Image: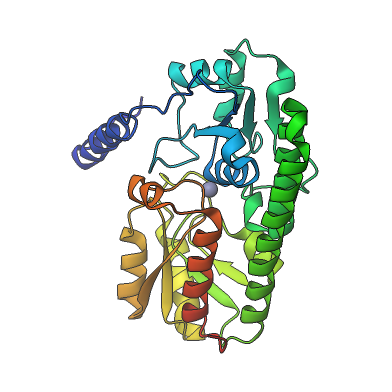
Amino acid sequence: MRRLGGAARIVLALLTLASIYCNSFPAQALSRENSKVKVVATLFPQFDFTRQIGKDKVEVVLVLPPGVEAHSFEPKPRDMARINEADLFIYTGKYMEPWVEGLLKGISNISANIIDVSKGVKLVASDPHIWLDMDNASMMVDNITAALIAKDPANKDYYIDNAKEYKLKLKSIDDRCRNAFKDCKYDTFVYAGHPAFGYFARRYGLTCLSPYKSLCPDSEPAPKSIMEVVDKMREKGIRYVYYEELLSPKLARTIAAETSSNMLPLNGAHNVSKADMDKGVTFLSILEEDLKNLKKGMECKSK
Ligand SMILES: [Zn+2]
């Protein structure tokens, strides 16, 4: 291992403490007493989609403990145990959750129960955040619906009706985003987080400026990349910088101070905090909040 200086050692110690703390939440266990379809979902989008489609006919747990960052997550033996007990295990794909491959090696559950929810989605290299394009989100809903029906054919119509209703809500937010972003002072937003908004920006013809080049949110962006973003903001007169959920807003604060701009949150919906989970936050409520904050930051005309 590379020799570390004092400051780096302190940072490393804090990170280790943080990860011990973050992973010490008790894991939600699947109950054995009911006949519901038992689902284990890796990330918040498929966790929430499954809840919305299956409602009272499913029991769904999230692999990520509340507030834990999705890319650098390391599964524990208890996660394997939960997958072995589940009827379905739903994940997004090998780019988003590289840790799933190792996890699957240790399980004895039959492969028919393992659902790659990105099936049919056109994957863009270096951006696994497929759920932030509403067509992809709809496809994920279809994949989850098909998996639930295969496990529980007696409730086929129930799942299909719920999925239909939910997809209308996805279409509604998609339409409102498209309309809102048509008439804004800026077509660019500055995100001081890892590259999570590629699909989203592409869908609405926007540019997302970020100093992060790596998917690993632990890696600090290079000062040169930060200065490039600062220069662009000054050149265009952009007055807002977005910070990432579940990540320290330190970088956004630096950029905001450098450019005399304001900070707003922007949530990529990978996972939610314990407080938000308890509050009943959903994928759709996260998007509503993102839409509101983007309209403000890009100075859009629509209210
Ligand atoms: Zn991400």
247 relative to 301 in the view: left or right: left
Please provide percent x and percent y for residue 102: 57, 20
At a point 40% along the width and 60% down the height, the residue shown is 223
Q: Nearer the viewer, residue 215 or 9?
A: 215
Q: Is any atom of residue 136 visible in this view?
A: no
What coloring was used for the rendering? rainbow
244 relative to 34 in the view: left or right: left
Which of the 4 image quadrants contains residue 26? top left
- Note whether 106 is above or below 53 in the view shown: above
Q: Is any atom of residue 260 visible in this view?
A: yes
Check the image and name the residue furthest to the top. 108
Please provide percent x and percent y for residue 8: 26, 39
87 relative to 14 in the view: left or right: right
At a point 43% along the width and 42% down the height, the residue shown is 69
Quadrant of the drawing holding the N terminus: top left
Please provide percent x and percent y for residue 288: 52, 67
At a point 57% along the width and 12% down the height, the residue shown is 106
Q: Nearer the viewer, residue 203 or 53?
A: 53
Please provide percent x and percent y for residue 36: 59, 27
Q: Nearer the viewer, residue 192 or 87?
A: 87
**Number of marks present in the image shown:** 0
Which of the 4 image quadrants contains residue 3? top left
Q: Nearer the viewer, residue 150 or 106?
A: 150
- Note whether 277 is above or below 87 in the view shown: below
50 relative to 3 in the view: left or right: right
